[in-house]
Amino acid sequence: MPTFMALQRFPNLIVLPTRFDVYRREAAIIRGILHRFTALIEPLSLDEAYLDVSARPEAPGALAAQIRRMIFEQTKLTSSAGIAPNKLIAKIASAINKPNGQLEVGPDEVAAFMENLPARQIWGIGEKTERKLQELGVKTCGDLQRFSRPELADLFGKFGLELYDLCRGIDDRPVEPDRPRKSLSTEETFPVDLNTFEECAEKLEELFEDLMAELAQKESTRQIQKIFVKLKFHDFTRTTAERAGFEPAPPAFRALLTEAFARTGKPVRLIGVGVRFAEPAAADAQIPLL
């Protein structure tokens, strides 16, 4: 949970400072290990990624065990893996033998694997869809397979067409190598406008917590070039304050909020906080002439 919520429940809670330098270092080591085996890597978060190793000569299960062993030897961190013909089943399988284990589902084992799998484990099925499935008597993927494609389309729209394939373990999505984003931000629109700087500062702290969690999960190794605060006012005008050369920290974001809020003093309906990443140098960039 966000730190501010934890402190509300437990005022004497000891909060240790975050160590993003450590997160970045360990994530970079792990990413380096993965790249020894394939260039086809699709990160999902700080500690999760898809790897396409279909071009490797080794058996995939043995390869996963080797990668996990190297991660532990170099970082002392355990890891788990799912080995399967596609991303859907690999992700589900990776959670089954946690912690520090792996599960392989071969192409000829897919049908049996999906038969008794809880339908909730299919990506895209949340609480609302799960309740609707339960009303239909559906608990497992095998139950879901009894519905035709048109029936699922009538029940769930376009997602129903996807469900028809997913409940059978069919997933044709390729592993897509990461394309670096230029920025990362989080924002919130408030049901009631914020009229004072103090109200805005309180919300800023919550957004900062969310941003740090996102950075740790998705962009822990990227170099941050700028930080920014965005405000949208009750009349839908907006302003952004940003600074280069600052690491994301509460005092720096509060200073930007002070600057942005002072520009108008109008009631605020939205606050956003974020970072802009340094662009990687082009491989064919011209060498500076001295």
Image (cartoon, grey):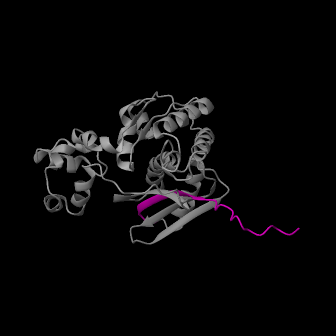
Q: Is residue 107 left or right of residue 30?
A: left
Q: Position of residue 209 (x, y in %)?
A: 48, 45
Is residue 88 shown above or below 155?
above
Residue 175 pos. (x, y %): 46, 54
Q: Is residue 287 left or right of residue 271?
A: right
The vertical placement of 11 against 283, above or below, is above
**Could you say which quadrant of the image residue 237 lies in?**
bottom left
Q: Look at the picture and state if 78 lies above or below 212.
A: above
Q: Which region is colored magenta?
A: 266-290
Quarter of the image with the N terminus is top left
Task: Give the position of the C terminus as an image quadrant.
Answer: bottom right
The percent coordinates of residue 135 (x first, y second) are 11, 46
Residue at the outermost front position: 57
Residue 243 percent location from the top left of the image: 63, 60
Residue visible at 40% across and 31% down in the picture = 98
Residue 84 versus residue 240: which sits nearer the camera? Answer: 84
Residue 181 falls in which quadrant of the image? bottom right
Q: Quadrant of residue 164?
A: bottom left
Say whether residue 151 is left or right of residue 67.
left
The residue positioned farthest toward the left in the image shown: 136
